[in-house]
Amino acid sequence: MEKLFFASDYMEGAHPAIMRRLEETNLVKSPGYGSDSFSESAREKIRSACRAPEAEVYFLAGGTQANSVVIGTMLRPYQGVLAAETGHVSVHEAGAIEAGGHKVITLPQRDGKLSAQIVRQWTETYLMDENRSHMVMPGLVYISQPTEMGTIYSLEELTGLSRVCREYGIALYADGARLAYELACPEIDVALPDQAVLCDAFYIGGTKCGTLFGEAVVFPKPGTVPHFFTMVKQRGALLAKGRIAGIQFDTLFTDSLYEEIGASAVRIADRIRKALSEKGYDQAFIAPTNQVFPVLTDEQLRRLSEKVEMSFWERTPDGRTIVRLASSWATREEEADALIALL
Amino acid sequence: MEKLFFASDYMEGAHPAIMRRLEETNLVKSPGYGSDSFSESAREKIRSACRAPEAEVYFLAGGTQANSVVIGTMLRPYQGVLAAETGHVSVHEAGAIEAGGHKVITLPQRDGKLSAQIVRQWTETYLMDENRSHMVMPGLVYISQPTEMGTIYSLEELTGLSRVCREYGIALYADGARLAYELACPEIDVALPDQAVLCDAFYIGGTKCGTLFGEAVVFPKPGTVPHFFTMVKQRGALLAKGRIAGIQFDTLFTDSLYEEIGASAVRIADRIRKALSEKGYDQAFIAPTNQVFPVLTDEQLRRLSEKVEMSFWERTPDGRTIVRLASSWATREEEADALIALL
Amino acid sequence: MEKLFFASDYMEGAHPAIMRRLEETNLVKSPGYGSDSFSESAREKIRSACRAPEAEVYFLAGGTQANSVVIGTMLRPYQGVLAAETGHVSVHEAGAIEAGGHKVITLPQRDGKLSAQIVRQWTETYLMDENRSHMVMPGLVYISQPTEMGTIYSLEELTGLSRVCREYGIALYADGARLAYELACPEIDVALPDQAVLCDAFYIGGTKCGTLFGEAVVFPKPGTVPHFFTMVKQRGALLAKGRIAGIQFDTLFTDSLYEEIGASAVRIADRIRKALSEKGYDQAFIAPTNQVFPVLTDEQLRRLSEKVEMSFWERTPDGRTIVRLASSWATREEEADALIALL
Amino acid sequence: MEKLFFASDYMEGAHPAIMRRLEETNLVKSPGYGSDSFSESAREKIRSACRAPEAEVYFLAGGTQANSVVIGTMLRPYQGVLAAETGHVSVHEAGAIEAGGHKVITLPQRDGKLSAQIVRQWTETYLMDENRSHMVMPGLVYISQPTEMGTIYSLEELTGLSRVCREYGIALYADGARLAYELACPEIDVALPDQAVLCDAFYIGGTKCGTLFGEAVVFPKPGTVPHFFTMVKQRGALLAKGRIAGIQFDTLFTDSLYEEIGASAVRIADRIRKALSEKGYDQAFIAPTNQVFPVLTDEQLRRLSEKVEMSFWERTPDGRTIVRLASSWATREEEADALIALL
């Protein structure tokens, strides 16, 4: 028997609807670099979903690329990024932000989240430091929504962060690698139009939410980064066949596919969380999205590992192991059944 | 009637065989970042095609990205690139090489090509300059094969460049955005194994040769760039679903698809070149690949533009216009017939 | 007998008046980083000499540093520098501008100078290029006044450049490593206040004009580069004992010392130029400043080299050698007498 | 009455012996860029003091510059720096290391010091992380000797760090901005030859130890950084009149001036520390060098501030204030008497 595959959410190709659309349009001729009509249609649908009719939308290939291009072009050389110490830009991008010349200033987090209060406190300490002209100025706050731990910022939390950022002239940017799974959470009270109001930039994840590749960077306010296109090109991030990203996002934002993808994965993750609770497993984070973090004894870990591909997360001080199980648009209910039966 | 589309060679999706293979494998689960079996199979086929069994092969998304990652990681900070003044890195990458910290030193070219003699002469002048420790050291020679003008380096020319480079300890790197169209030229005497022997790095173009996106970077000698993987990640160029590139290149290097793609486009370009000659048109470059460069009078330009999408190249001193017509794997013989009928 | 030393203009310590002032103030205590009263006095005198009462003035250590910090902070990532192919930033700064991420676009020069016409023509070609969003945008024009060949821009020439730059929104920056020697030329019609009106930034050279080290960067319009101080620190260019630069420039701009230094060197260079003419030597450039460029036969070169330290400049096509002789504030009339006697 | 000046150790010009020597040599002509005989003599004396006859020695202008040039040229793009969270490179260099493309990974410290154990633990965690190829590799450990808190690494501590670094192939670099004051501590058991054996690079501070400016970078093993000279030039850090730094370091290393400078300052700091103890003041760090860190009540702070210039360090949780008092070569015993009388 093949192992059950819950190690991550980017292990297949694309959602069948996307494959179908790529196939249908394959021989249509169109100009390059995102100037095609598929990309324009996708941009228009995203603007509409965000209720941000003037937003600028760009399609990049992946998450680290989106983060480093957006952050690198929004900051001036004397500015740095504030991020949770667990943020993707802080630990898992091989120093991409620093390679672009900017310090990532890591702040304490809770469940992967930054609080408005901690950002305010850090910024005020900076502003009162007599030596601040010898220090890196905070230019942007990086959050991930949902976070690397699968947790989500509530509307109140996001509003709080946005307010602090605007008070101090700091940009707010949200990494939405798994955005579909947040938008689909029953308890979430943040919708795309809220993000468009509260953030200066964010990206709508494709790679982990159903596409072959691709992330849609959104600047709600036009002109946020002048000459962004040229800087995308300069950083090697401009897709010659921009249409391939455009077609995929156009499909994601047609007939509510993005919502559907998220909902299916969250429903399955919820079933797994519920089963874990019922069977007495601890869970490391209260994560309502598509990621589940059971805490396993060595015996449980050994037994489960034989039949399930999971991601190692970290060891706990009491000698157990946190693992991550991820569902996606591609996870079938039968796979969840089989997993639950093994718990 | 729709216009005939000869403006470029990356205006459709992917070759149907690639689309088919993506479809077939779509729901297979595999690990990320190029560690999947499709990518490994593709790498193995490329090693075999290059007769370089130890070569390291990496799949990146596009040409500017490949150029800037390879050049940026092969050079030390005190080194620069020598390139033709018409080279893609010199003019059409929005300063990507310089953004990575390195000077592009432009040398005179002929038909888009650098000569061994000019590289030698420049290098010797550098080496004799008393102030050379205040100057940028040549670290790498960039060529495009075929060139931006569609011309190709013969085996003798490439061997000459390689010899000069090795004599002076300079790396030789070939941009193969349109490599399929060179390999398919009847008169070419350079094969992939020759490039693998003569160059320190090169890339095999996908985007302009039949894929949705993707270029295969080849380092014939393993260990050429230690930790290349991490630097690819750092530059935002690591594909999470590396398999999507792997599957495409695996298909290109199965059943001679790459050769077939090149041959079909070159055959059509040859027909167009022949027709131009017969009808008395001048051609700007002697280009045996998939690009054709007729020189048009204003009247010819006006008339042809009504029915054909072409690329503007440049004005000639005598007041005519060079345009570029490109064929590709997707160009049908009927389209060539129609174009020729219009000449 | 010691050889006569005309190889360059930075071979001694500092003008005696500067040494005296450093000595007098040596034990005075003052705060660091340029916030001392000596530096403030120097800034005020420079503002006054430039008739630019709101100018921002910063003291950096050397010319390459001044160029790379000013250019690197004035440009946005998508912009590059236009410079003469003989410009210091183009050839003799080891790729400092590119290390800061920006392309140096080299333009043809005459006697080391760029013309307004060539800048205009290049810029218009760029603006009409359909692919310009894939290219480096011109952000700054770099000139050296006087140039590396000792020539100078007239008020008409400088005004022309300034006009073109402003028309296209390009900054104009003048490298004044040898500014004292220009200001002292009898025929010059450009004074400091003109530069302050026509340029967006320039530096007043110290190292080659009488100080131990140091260049005074002037931004005539305040706020030209926000947070310049922090970026100077970031680039390792902030002097802890900023007063040492401040005291030197305060002395240079007291009792017309800067003019005096220039005048003495130019007078000597003029004597040498006149003697060369009278004795039938060719001169490579019409240079009215402190640099003299005789063209020597091999026999003349051999004979003179025995007794005079000179700089090799370049070989001429007819097999002769251009050398550079430089005078400075430290060159005595007796040394000129001795040199002339040898011609 | 003038206030007593204990705010820092770089508030005057240069030690009188240095001023004298600059004066004496002022009109001697010599070649530029450090190729003069004064610089060569200084390098030779430093090699001798370090008992490292093959060491490469370079003179740079300041500490942030030395740190960013050395670190930036020793690291490869995929590597970062490990530093104490209080390290100068971590907080007070305006992001200079990141501007050069490298992450500063901050580790917990005690009294400003890193321990071998913490470096080992961090490195082993990194090496065991399955995702380490997506992370920044540790390439260099940065320490300051003495530290920003005036504390010093013992021979045992430094040996421990060196051993861990070599075990893992990480370079060890020591920032010696205040090195003279460490070497002069009665209890120190680390001498320059020990540093030369244990570190891969370090700098001997001038600016805070008696010169007008200047730090001497030492690479005990020749060839540590190929083409370092060109990269110094590229980063704008090459002094045209290199002799000015050379003369100053030549003087510092003649007749034990460097030791004398350190000893005088430490003797005075010891007197102040003793007086503080006797009068019942708390001190924040056990610092045996030229910096003293009394903890003051608001009343004491107010009273002392009226007559003494001090540096604010930080508030304590119990509502008192840590201030820093620094002595230097220029502090006279009478000034210490006056300060002690005020305590």
Image (cartoon, coloured by chain):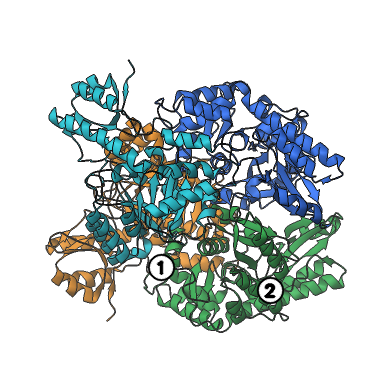
Chain colours: A orange, B green, C blue, D cyan
Q: Is D104 in front, or is A178?
A: D104
Q: Is residue C151 visible?
A: no
Q: Examine the image and state in which quarter residue B127 appears.
A: bottom right
Look at the numbered disc 2 and give the secondary structure of its residue.
Answer: loop
Q: Nearer the viewer, residue C216 or A173?
A: C216
Instruction: Tell me the tag on residue B332.
Output: 2
Q: Amino acid at mark 1?
A: Tyr
Asked if one can make out residue A33 in the rendered structure from this viewpoint, the answer is yes
Q: Is residue A163 left or right of residue C187?
A: left
- Residue under circle 1? B33
Q: Tell me which numbered mark, 2 or 1, is placed earlier along the sequence.
A: 1
- Image location of residue D143, percent across then percent down: 32, 50
Question: Circle 2: is it few (<14), some (14-19), or many (20+) Cα within 10 Å?
Answer: few
Name the image quarter holding the N terminus of chain D: top left
> As rendered, which of B286 and B275 lies closer to the eye?
B286
Quadrant housing the C terminus of chain D: top left
Q: How many marks?
A: 2
* Mark 2 vs mark 1, CA separation in Å: 36 Å
Circle 1 crowding by C-alpha within 10 Å: few under 14, some 14–19, many from 20:
some
**Amino acid type indicated by mark 2:** Arg
Give residue B68's position: percent from left, percent from top.
55, 60
| C196 displayed left or right of A245 | right
In the image, farthest residue toward the top: D1
Q: Position of residue D242 (x, y in %)?
A: 53, 45
Please give left or right for residue A19 compared with residue A148 in the image: right
Q: In the rendering, at what x and y percent does residue C45 appear?
A: 57, 22
**Which chain letter goes with mark 2?**
B
Which of the two marks, 2 or 1, is nearer to us in this view?
1
